Image (cartoon, helix red, strand yellow):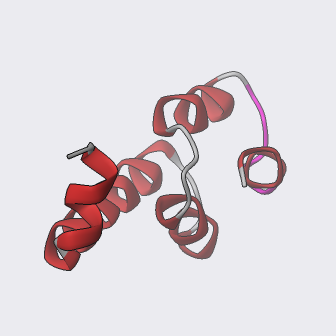
Amino acid sequence: MSPANVLEERPDLVAQVEAWRLHVLLKAGYPLRVAERIAKSAADLHQAVEMLERGCTPHVAARILT
């Protein structure tokens, strides 16, 4: 069974992962609504954080990532 299948079968786990991703994105400096959109997407979390660290605005980063 692939990791994606495990997540699909455990909605509680999906919610926990999204909450953790949201926390990381908010801590990095994303506004709440933008962070929520990225957290729910398949965007690379590390890349999302690095983009802000390199000076990209949150809205532009979200457009690129999602």
Q: Is residue 17 above or below residue 2?
A: below
State left or right for residue 55 relative to residue 43: right
x 72%, y 46%: residue:
65
x 48%, y 30%: residue:
46
- Foreground of the two, 26 or 39: 39
Displayed quadrant of residue 11: bottom left
Q: Is residue 56 magenta?
A: yes
Question: Quarter holding the C terminus?
Answer: bottom right
Q: Where does the image place residue 29, in percent across and percent down from the top left?
A: 53, 49
State left or right for residue 64 relative to residue 47: right
Q: Is residue 57 above or below residue 40?
A: above
Q: Is residue 10 above or below residue 59?
A: below
The region drawn magenta spans 55-59
- Foreground of the two, 2 or 66: 2
x 60%, y 69%: residue:
37
- Please count the marks in the image: 0
State left or right for residue 18 relative to residue 66: left
Which residue is outermost to the front? 1
Principal secondary structure, stretch drawn in magenta: loop
Q: Where does the image place residue 19, in percent across and percent down from the top left?
A: 29, 66
Q: Where does the image place residue 12, in percent across and percent down from the top left?
A: 15, 76
Q: Is residue 50 magenta?
A: no
Displayed quadrant of residue 7: bottom left
State left or right for residue 32 relative to residue 13: right
Q: Where does the image place residue 39, in percent across and percent down from the top left?
A: 47, 60
x 34%, y 64%: residue:
18
Displayed quadrant of residue 35: bottom right
